Amino acid sequence: MQVASEPPEPNRTPTGTAPIGLTPAGLTLVATPIGNMADLSPRALASFRDADAVLCEDTRVTGSLLARHGVSVTMIPLHEHNEDDQIPRLLARLQAGERLALASDAGTPLVSDPGYRLVRAAIAEGLPVSAVPGPNAAVMALTLSGLPPHPFLFHGFLPPKAAARLAVLAGLRAAERAGLSATLIFYEAPHRLGEMLAGLAEGLGGARPAAVARELTKRFEEVRRGSLAELAAWYAENEARGEVVVVVGPAPEEATGEADLDAQLQAAVAAGLSLRDAAATVAEATGLPRKQVYQRALALKG
Ligand code: SAM
């Protein structure tokens, strides 16, 4: 009996399912440990073993991981500076049916790590892209922070210079004022943690609850929780060691001020809504009682 295979959908690339030992042809994004070597999954190891080549950020780092498990495979450096140049060659290898595994120095590839441009190019060519999931510092920090796990916004690294950092934080704050309510996740280098936390306190407000997750999965793993102001004060005095993730709780709901309410009502009326509809729309957006908003609308009209 012949089974007709489904025609490929235009915006889908096959990923296949991959039991251990049967790594499919194509590009496989392989997560590796973020500190604790026991976190390398059997399927990650199989992907490396089965690969025609392993693309990696730093061949010394991935080479020592592979050597630890007795895997001998060709490694190809793929980093920020050569990714664009490598893409045509790598696509040709994928088109020839090879299995390429992509690993970063630690954790999940592409997350503040190289690989996005290659993945985008492979998808555009309709080539198979799959992943072996595993450790990720951002998600682990989020789950240990005690802060609302979703929605969350992963930002990665903020700019190191104070002015650029404040500009990015001003953008986030503006999004929050416009309604974004999400737990925020940042990566940071330990030597910048003190000044980065001071910047967060300045840009987002010192009262915001936060957590600093350090050395995750390692011997000196620690999660310190407090307000941004408290954490900034602590790390101004105490040098952080090791790797860190900073998690910041969502912006507190701000009471809609009178000026803000008036502005929203005026905008709704200017958009052509009747006074009653404008009040209903603004009441829904602000969560204020409809009657109160309508009375304010009448007063404004008067
Ligand atoms: N791809 C990685 C992942 O999935 O988490 C992240 C790579 S990024 C270049 C490195 C940053 O991740 C570090 O500067 C730190 O902010 C965070 N990080 C990585 N490992 C960590 C760990 N064990 N504990 C805390 N933070 C970690």
Image (tube, rainbow, N blue to C red):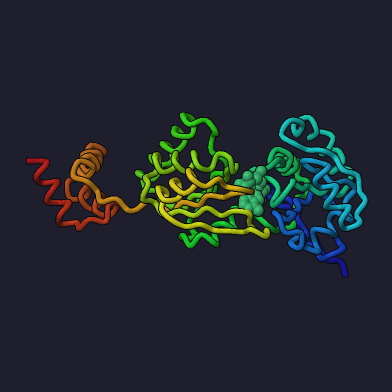
Q: Quadrant of the C terminus?
A: top left
Seen as rendered, the residue at the extreme front is 237
Horizontal side of 206 relative to 41 (left or right) equals: left
Please say whether residue 178 is visible from this viewpoint: yes
Residue situated in front as seen by the camera: 278 or 193: 193
Residue situated in front as seen by the camera: 152 or 127: 152
Residue situated in front as seen by the camera: 250 or 222: 222
The residue shown at (21%, 39%) is 266
Image location (x, y in percent) of residue 182: 45, 52
Seen as rendered, the residue at the extreme left is 302
Image location (x, y in percent) of residue 100: 84, 47
Horizontal side of 123 relative to 259 (left or right) equals: right
Residue situated in front as seen by the camera: 225 or 102: 225
The residue shown at (60%, 42%) is 189
Q: Quadrant of the N terminus?
A: bottom right
Please say whether residue 7 is visible from this viewpoint: no
Image location (x, y in percent) of residue 21: 87, 63
Identify the image quadrant of residue 136: bottom right
Circle count: 0
The residue shown at (11%, 41%) is 300
Image location (x, y in percent) of residue 126: 75, 45
The residue shown at (27%, 52%) is 286
Identify the image quadrant of residue 117: top right
